[in-house]
Amino acid sequence: MSRIDLMRAFATLGEFGNYRTAAEVLGITQPTLSKQIVRLEDILGHQLFHRSRQGTELTEFGQAYLREVSPLIEEAERVW
């Protein structure tokens, strides 16, 4: 799994705020998405989401990181 794939998973979850919906959009299972998010958080050393039964909400760090990675993901998709 590449880091751009992890960032894409993060951005999709950040957009939808719901693991089920984000996993469907990405074409993966919820447990796989959850593992990807945890892996990215471990790499970054920061929590990206506040998790609750109602869904997920970006942390302050997550909001800033989303602003940083969104252009990278768009550029990666453009060149593929």
Image: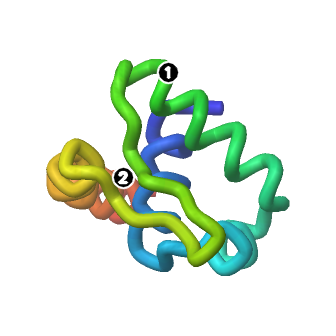
Residue 77 drawn at (x, y percent): 41, 61
Locate the N terminus and report the quarter of the image it occupies. top right
User: Alpha-carbon distance for marks 2 and 1?
Assistant: 23 Å
Kindly identify which residue carries mark 1. 42
Whether residue 26 sits left or right of residue 8 in the image: it is right
* Residue at the spot 46% in from the left edge and 31% down from the top edge: 41
* Residue at the spot 41% in from the left edge and 60% down from the top edge: 11
* Residue at the spot 34% in from the left edge and 59% down from the top edge: 58
Relative to 65, residue 9 above or below: below
Q: Secondary structure at mark 1?
A: helix
How many other residues sit within 10 Å of disc 1, few (<14), some (14-19) or many (≥20)?
few
Q: Secondary structure at mark 2?
A: helix
Name the residue type under label 1.
Answer: Asp
Kindly identify which residue carries mark 2. 76
Q: How is the image coloured?
A: rainbow
Q: Nearer the viewer, residue 33 or 49?
A: 49
Residue 10 drawn at (x, y percent): 47, 53
Q: Nearer the viewer, mark 2 or mark 1?
A: 1
Q: Nearer the viewer, residue 6 or 74?
A: 6
